[in-house]
């Protein structure tokens, strides 16, 4: 099947999401749609899949115009789609999910046996290893994604759209998915691969179409360099490498011991984590989303209620304090969801820049705010952090995602800090803003601030980290050096302790000059995984080792 988008435009009111987009997906081809968040990639694919009708232009199959009134029409035409957020019923089995909407019957009964047979056939052909009778909610995320692919193949999809398919996968699962994509291509299925991850795009694509602000700006091959692709996405040259001096080392500024967070339902979300962060060091916490990273950062800044253990910043205990008290000790915090937890959308840029400082004498006098001082402060921050806004009085909700994130970063780095905690610091941010934010984080580290970041983007982890910690199911798998291979990190993210992946090299803050000088990628701490565990409690025994 040859699939063509011919001058497709999609508008929402006055906003043009796609502007006269033309591209062709050939048979036996992996065609990547590359662009920043908000570039219009997903909107275009929703047009192709029948979820949206184009404002103008046409979709063509083998040269003939087609019109889809819904996804059912697209599926009937041989187009399947795996959404970024899976469309599965968690309590159903794999077979029930695959049959849903495509049911076959035997008399008055649902014929699941034929569905099971088809699942086994596809699984065997592509090495999926999917049990038709497994309950979906019991499956790892990577296997759930394979179920979505099977759903499309059972419906005889000739073109498969994958929307940001690696966003929730470990590195190992990502590599497995890329290999599955190659197998599908060889068997005759064409793939439209929507992504913003340059390494993956170059690894698997035959053709790369770059979209910027709703328009096609280039169509290139996988031999195009990462820097060239980034420049095409943004419209200017971008440096994806952060220049860093060696970390300072010295005594630990932040000492975390046995930090545990229990959810409202009694489930342990963070389990006895031990870690240290030195002044002038970036410790990056890696792991698939939902493995305790959020609870770790929120426990450090007083946003979790059921917390035990200790977190001491320069000797002062943080556990048990409220958020205002923690921030008052010189802690800056960038939450993972800026819209919900980091900004007040209806407040102005200027107001958001002093959300945690409006009581300071610089910005208030008694019960009254010093509006002139707040405006002057905002003007300086807007200039320093290159925040693109028409006015500091504009509602922050009117800014782009990248500029909203810059507001949060500017606010948190706009005062002297002992500890900077950033969760997903560049989520939903364009490549140009990523470059800027990374430079600011490194600059803060170079002033001597201890920095702890959480990121699901391994490229970001490698770009920033002096050491890398990995969480899995709330437990610390270990802390390793910045040169640890991706494959080893991927194994840790899948639950293997660091001691099984790389040789252990204990880290002693009092004797070693700098974490960054340990350039062999070895373990510096595996407080949870490396120590012996009590059979009675399944908790580490003994005191944490430095």
Image (cartoon, rainbow, N blue to C red):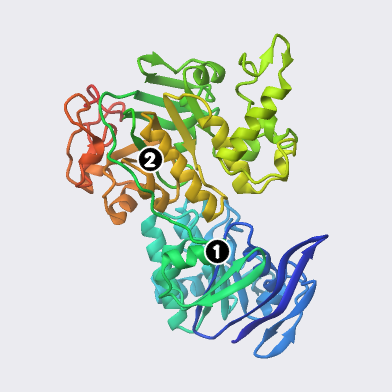
Residue 211 placed where, x, y %?
60, 68
Quarter of image, res 454: top left
Of callouts 2 and 1, the N-terminal one: 1
Residue 517 placed where, x, y %?
21, 40
Q: Disc number at residue 284?
A: 2
Residue 15 placed where, x, y %?
77, 60
Q: Residue at x 38, y 20 (%)?
A: 313
Q: Nearer the viewer, mark 2 or mark 1?
A: 1
Q: CA distance from mark 2 to mark 1?
A: 26 Å
Q: Is residue 424 above or below residue 417?
A: below
Quarter of image, res 391: top right
In this figure, which residue is indicated by the disc labeled 1?
A: 233
Q: Residue lying at the far bottom in this picture: please name it.
A: 63
Q: Residue at x 75, y 39 (%)?
A: 394
Residue 254 is left or right of residue 524, and the answer is right
Q: Quadrant of the C terminus?
A: top left
Q: Nearer the viewer, residue 435 or 455?
A: 435
Q: Residue at x 39, y 14 (%)?
A: 316
Q: Are marks 2 and 1 in contact (CB under 8 Å)?
A: no
Q: Residues within 10 Å of mark 2 (few under 14, many from 20)?
A: many
Q: Tell how many labels.
A: 2
Q: Nearer the viewer, residue 152 or 284?
A: 284
Secondary element at tag 1:
helix
Q: Residues within 10 Å of mark 1 (few under 14, many from 20)?
A: many
Residue 47 is left or right of residue 187, and the answer is right
Q: Is residue 501 visible?
A: yes
């Amino acid at each position: 099947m040859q699939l063509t988008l011919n001058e497709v435009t999609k508008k929402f009111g006055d906003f043009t999401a796609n502007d006269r987009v033309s591209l062709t997906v050939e048979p036996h081809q992996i065609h990547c749609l590359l662009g920043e968040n908000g570039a219009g990639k997903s909107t275009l694919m929703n047009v192709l899949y029948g979820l949206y009708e184009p404002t103008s232009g046409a979709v063509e199959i083998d040269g003939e115009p087609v019109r889809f009134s819904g996804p059912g029409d697209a599926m009937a035409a041989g187009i399947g789609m795996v959404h970024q957020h899976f469309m599965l019923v968690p309590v159903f089995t794999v077979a029930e999910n695959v049959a849903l909407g495509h049911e076959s019957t035997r008399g008055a009964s649902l014929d699941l046996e034929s569905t099971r047979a088809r699942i086994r056939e596809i699984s065997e052909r592509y090495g999926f290893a999917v049990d038709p009778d497994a309950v979906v909610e019991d499956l790892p995320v990577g296997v759930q994604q394979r179920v979505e692919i099977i759903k499309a193949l059972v419906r005889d999809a000739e073109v498969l759209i994958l929307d940001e398919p690696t966003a929730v996968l470990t590195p190992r699962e990502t590599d497995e998915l890329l290999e599955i994509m190659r197998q599908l291509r060889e068997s005759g299925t064409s793939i439209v691969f929507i992504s913003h991850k340059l390494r993956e795009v170059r690894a698997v694509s035959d053709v790369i179409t770059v979209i910027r602000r709703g328009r096609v700006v280039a169509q290139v091959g996988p031999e195009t360099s990462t820097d060239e692709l980034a420049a095409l996405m943004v419209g200017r040259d971008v440096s994806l490498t952060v220049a860093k001096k060696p970390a300072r080392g010295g005594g630990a500024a932040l000492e975390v011991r046995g930090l545990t967070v229990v959810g409202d339902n009694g489930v342990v979300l963070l389990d006895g984590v031990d870690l240290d962060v030195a002044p002038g060091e970036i410790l990056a916490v890696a792991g698939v989303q939902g493995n305790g990273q959020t609870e770790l950062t929120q426990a450090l800044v007083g946003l979790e209620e059921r917390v035990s253990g200790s977190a001491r910043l320069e000797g002062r205990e943080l556990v048990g304090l409220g958020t205002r008290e923690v921030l008052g000790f010189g802690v800056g915090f960038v939450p993972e969801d800026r819209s919900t937890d980091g900004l007040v959308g209806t407040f102005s840029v200027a107001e958001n820049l002093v959300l945690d400082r409006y009581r300071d004498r610089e910005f208030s006098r008694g019960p009254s705010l010093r509006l002139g001082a707040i405006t002057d402060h905002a003007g300086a921050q807007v200039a320093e952090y290159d925040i693109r806004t028409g006015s500091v009085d504009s509602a922050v909700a009117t800014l782009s995602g990248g500029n909203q994130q810059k507001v949060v970063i500017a606010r948190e780095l706009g005062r002297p800090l002992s500890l900077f905690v950033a969760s997903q610091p560049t989520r939903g941010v364009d490549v140009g803003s990523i470059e800027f934010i990374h430079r600011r984080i490194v600059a803060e580290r170079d002033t001597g601030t201890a920095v702890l970041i959480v990121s699901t983007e391994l490229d970001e982890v490698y770009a920033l980290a002096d050491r890398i910690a990995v969480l899995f199911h709330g437990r610390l798998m270990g802390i390793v050096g910045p040169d640890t291979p991706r494959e080893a990190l991927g194994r840790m993210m899948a639950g293997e302790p660091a001691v099984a992946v790389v040789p252990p090299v204990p880290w002693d803050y009092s004797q070693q000059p700098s974490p960054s000088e340990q350039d062999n990628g070895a373990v510096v701490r595996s407080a949870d995984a490396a120590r012996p565990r009590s059979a009675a409690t399944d908790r580490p025994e003994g005191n944490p080792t430095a």
